[in-house]
Image (spheres, coloured by chain):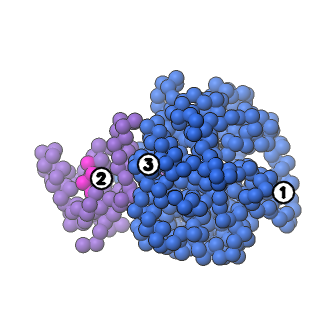
Chain colours: A purple, B blue
Amino acid sequence: MQPLTRNDILVRPSWARLKACKVRGHPVLLVPEQVLYPCPTTVEVLERLESPTLYGAVIDALAADYDAPADVIETDLTPLVSGLLEQGYVRRIDA
Amino acid sequence: MSDASTLERPADTDRPAAETPVLLGLLAEVTHRCPLQCPYCSNPVALDAPNSELSATEWGRVFREAAALGALQLHLSGGEPLARRDIVDIVAEARAADLYINLITAAVNLSPERADALVAAGVDHVQVSLQDATSEGCGAITNMKGAFEKKRAACALVTERGLPLTLNAVVHRHNLDNVERMIAIAVELGAHRLEIANTQYYGWALANRAALMPRPEQVAKAGEIVDAARERLRGTLNIDYVAPDYYARYPKPCMGGWGQQFLAITPSGAVMPCHAAASIPNMAFDNVKTTPLGDIWRASEAFQRFRGTDWMREPCRSCARKDEDFGGCRCQAMMVTGDAANTDPVCVLSPHRAALDAALAEATAADTPPAFTWRRYAKGEPAA
Ligand code: SF4
Ligand code: SF4
């Protein structure tokens, strides 16, 4: 897989559905044949990828929210988002 | 990234023992009608009549009740769900209940217009059955000429619309040697997943057991092919392989435990802890036409009978694996030992394992297996 860069445009396919589950009291990610419990950071990323978005913009938004340097956020986030890409729950769109 | 750090599977059974479990998913068999006649069909041999089927509005109420119990995943199945003229309405009802919709279909009658309508109504994922890797093989198993070509065309309709596609292959003596070609077809059709499941011997499949039971050398070879393909196709195709349990030492877990995560609803509205539970003769199933789903899930006799582990006898009662496999399959225990409360006879610790070994030896001894009987709607009992 190509390494992830700030210029990549990412989107969550419509079939990877993020839902706030009232019965369980936390968000779930629904994908074929599986129900997954995303960690809070994954939820924040997935929420921001409902429509095609620059990965750099996701990093900057989280950096602003957490009042942290963008490069620190990027270092933390990249392995997480790469994993989502590998599993197909996030897609890269050719610019 | 480690999968576990960001995306974890739920542990829905983490709760005080006395509480009712949280429902995770439901199987809605919306009709028993089907244009195909697979000899291993998991439908009961006595099929529900079309005029007893729940309406789309009734399904809508049931879906909302299931969601209130915690259900997230819906498996829309049959028979053939596309045999329902109002399948798009049923899907729309499921979407309104905010369920994740898996459509499980034989896909021999999917037009582009219907595919568009299903996507617009909210289908999330489509599973298409693949009976064999060739047109002749597929025709012989389904008793429908041209089924293979129709399925391939339907798969293209699914992937062109951006939906994830799973191919479901049920394997047995007649097609287990074709696993490599099935994998190639899944890749060619752009499937996300391929599920290769050895036949489970209940319902129509039990009647056809001697014709369908694979030979040991077939089982070993298929296992090797799947292992190699998984490695080779990592990131392209996920392959789930369900090994044949007659060849195993321990049974498979009964879907997360009886009455723990799932329920199945028949076309006419009977609610069962599993889709094969109708094979347990002295068990009564409450119906959503007369009883709210929540009451059935929480308190009906069928769900309570094998919930948890208190009902177990020896050797399960004192076995360390009992929370892992739940004593195996109640339906298989019923069919092979005559008592659903017995240990699954697949288990090497079961006193009935010898009966199963004898059936296995008999079924695999013949060089040419007997012909199988196709599933048919009208008469009910298979003539095996
Ligand atoms: S009882 Fe058997 S057939 Fe039914 S869900 Fe359990 S394992 Fe499956
Ligand atoms: S004895 Fe029962 S619980 Fe133990 S492995 Fe066998 S079936 Fe499972």
Is residue A85 a member of the stretch shown in magenta? no
Q: Which residue position is annotated with label 3?
A: B99
Is residue A45 a member of the stretch shown in magenta? yes
Query: Dot 2 falls on which chain?
Result: A
Give the residue type at disc 2. Leu
Q: How many marks?
A: 3
Q: Is residue A65 above or below residue B236?
A: above
Q: Callout 3 environment at 10 Å: few (<14), some (14 to 19), or many (20+)?
A: many
Q: Residue at x 77, y 35 (%)?
A: B339
Q: Disc 1 on helix, strand or loop?
A: loop
Q: Are marks 2 and 1 on the same chain?
A: no
Q: Is residue B233 above or below residue B378?
A: below
Which label belongs to residue B383?
Answer: 1
Q: What secondary structure characterizes most of the magenta part?
A: helix
Tell me the CA gap for discs 2 and 3.
19 Å
Q: Residue at x 40, y 62 (%)?
A: B120
Residue A64 position within the rendered picture, expressed as x and y whole percent measured from the top left: 13, 49
